[in-house]
Image: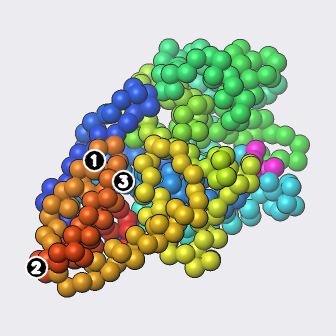
């Protein structure tokens, strides 16, 4: 699949800083030390509805990770998937009487437009589950040959007990895992499973549903976790720097993915840091396609909201916090945007070098975007109150806000 166009990332004076980021698996801040090419996999959308503010907040967090790395003069190898075949997509297509593939294509197109408008850097590989099937099938076959997978009525399940490290990403107890498995696409109550938590690797073809050739597995479609493992291992290989997603992916998705990869390669962890963004709520509840309490990025854009204001609204919250979207959040972001735009269009200001360092320091410290915004606010206020004589400063601030925060002033 093609991704979306990249906005240019201006180079900044001085030296970028290495990222320390919270790793769910260890529960602490992990100093990352990527090679000359930093590698990141971010779980993509299931395209049955438009991009909402919650999605945008999560992708914003991983966009910042890349901007910090680019500022250290590294290259970034970024891979993202699209879960373009899964139960929720088929259910929505059925409900609306539309073709599932057309629905996926339409919503993926809209996602690309939203990401472009928000100046999110595109992945180098943007891979759909359907196009990944030829790579998924051999992995499932290998897991079966290793004795880590078993059949149940022609479906193929992964045995979590085959992985000595199972549980080391989420660190949850069995009861919590079982609850989350039932909530998030698992089937812990299906009779005949070796362990209730075992996730499906390959689902045998169902009457009236799309299916693909699965070689020795028979016709069917892939499970969700093996989809991301196949795509990540194919394009990034084991031991990449960051796997990212919202906190609702910690279990089962990222736990199961790490487990599949561990059994396939004998290595742990698949990612050096498992990084999770908090959940954005609306009216007191997590914004979710299934609940329908959504604010769509495309809807805001259509209503004339500047995408830079949307982006500033996201940046005003720490990526790990759960927070609530309100009209006031967007109003505040719009005011900040105007204030910053006025500041960088003045002919001079206080020197900007210290500000660039403050933004760098804030982001390198577990992506503290709110601290970065506060630093820019202070520079703008000082300029307003005391003026300044540095003619290069507004330009540097404008480039730094663009390069490090993805906001075009
Ligand atoms: N296709 C899978 C990942 S492989 C999936 O979870 N798709 S999704 O469309 O449901 O979500 C896409 C991303 O947005 C995930 O990282 C998810 O954790 C994140 N996300 C979903 N809802 C919210 C929310 N309310 N707040 C923050 N992030 C969210
Ligand atoms: Zn995923």
Q: Mark 2: which secondary structure?
A: loop
Q: Secondary structure at mark 1?
A: helix
Q: Earlier in the sequence, mark 3 or mark 1?
A: 1
206 sits to left or right of 220:
right
| Residue 188 visible | yes
Q: Would you say 308 lies left or right of 131 here?
A: left
Alpha carbons under labels 1 and 2: distance apart: 29 Å
- Which residue sits at x=47%, y=66%? 332
Rendered-image quadrant of the N terminus? bottom right
Looking at the picture, does residue 116 appear above or below residue 21?
below
Q: How many marks?
A: 3
Q: Is mark 2 within 8 Å of ligand 1?
A: no
Say if 34 sits above or below 260 in the image: below
Instruction: From the image, tell me which residue sits under label 1.
Output: 364
Q: Note whether 15 is above or below 174 in the view shown.
A: below
The reply to whether discs 3 and 1 touch (Cβ–Cβ < 8 Å) is no
Nearest to N terminus: mark 3 or mark 2: 3
Q: Position of residue 124 (x, y in %)?
A: 43, 58
Q: Nearer the viewer, residue 43 or 205?
A: 43
The tag on residue 369 is: 3
In the picture of the structure, the residue carrying the numbered disc 2 is 389
Q: Secondary structure at mark 3?
A: helix
The reply to whether dot 3 and dot 2 touch (C-beta < 8 Å) is no
x then y, percent, for residue 38: 31, 47
Q: Residue at x 68, y 22 (%)?
A: 178
Earlier in the chain: of badge 1 and badge 2, it is 1
- Residue beneath the point at 31% across and 33% down: 30
- How does the figure colour the protein chain or chains? rainbow
Residue 214: % across, % down: 70, 38
Q: Point out the stretch of residues depicted in magenta.
A: 87-91
- Tell which residue pokes out farthest to the bottom in this image: 347
Residue furthest to the left in view is 389
């Amino acid at each position: 699949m093609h991704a979306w166009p990249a906005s240019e990332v201006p180079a900044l004076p001085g030296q970028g800083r290495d990222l320390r980021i919270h790793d769910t698996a260890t529960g602490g801040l992990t100093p990352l030390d990527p090679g000359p090419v930093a590698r990141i996999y971010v779980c993509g959308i299931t395209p049955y509805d438009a991009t909402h503010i919650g999605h945008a907040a999560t992708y914003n967090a991983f966009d910042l990770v890349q901007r910090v790395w680019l500022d250290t003069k590294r290259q970034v190898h970024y891979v993202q998937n699209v879960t373009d075949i899964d139960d929720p997509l088929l259910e929505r297509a059925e409900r609306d009487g539309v073709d599932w593939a057309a629905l996926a294509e339409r919503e993926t197109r809209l996602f690309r437009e939203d990401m472009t408008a928000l100046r999110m850097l595109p992945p180098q590989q943007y891979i759909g589950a359907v196009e990944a099937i030829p790579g998924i099938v051999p992995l499932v076959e290998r897991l079966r040959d290793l004795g880590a997978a078993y059949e149940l009525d022609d479906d193929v399940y992964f045995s979590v007990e085959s992985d000595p490290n199972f549980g080391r990403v989420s660190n949850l107890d069995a009861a919590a895992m079982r609850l989350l498995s039932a909530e998030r696409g698992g089937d812990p109550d299906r009779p005949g499973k070796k362990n209730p938590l075992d996730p499906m690797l390959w689902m045998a073809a169902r009457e009236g549903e799309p299916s693909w050739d699965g070689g020795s597995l028979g016709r069917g479609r892939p499970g969700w976790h093996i989809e991301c493992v196949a795509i990540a291992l194919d394009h990034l290989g084991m031991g990449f720097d960051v796997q990212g997603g919202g906190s609702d992916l910690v279990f089962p998705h990222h736990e199961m993915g790490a487990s599949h990869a561990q059994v396939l390669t004998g290595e742990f962890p698949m990612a050096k840091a498992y990084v999770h963004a908090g959940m954005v709520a609306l009216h007191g509840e997590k914004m979710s396609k299934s609940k329908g309490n959504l604010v769509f990025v495309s809807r805001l854009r259509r209503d004339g909201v500047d995408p830079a204001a949307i982006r500033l609204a996201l940046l005003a919250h720490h990526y790990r916090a759960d927070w609530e979207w309100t009209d006031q959040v967007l109003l505040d972001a719009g005011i900040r945007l105007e204030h910053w735009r006025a500041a960088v269009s003045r002919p001079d200001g206080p020197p900007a070098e210290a500000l660039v360092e403050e933004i760098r320091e804030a982001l390198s410290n577990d992506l503290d975007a709110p601290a970065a915004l506060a630093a820019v606010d202070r520079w703008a206020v000082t300029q307003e109150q005391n003026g300044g004589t540095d003619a290069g400063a507004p330009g540097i601030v404008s480039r730094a806000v663009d390069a490090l925060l993805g906001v075009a002033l």
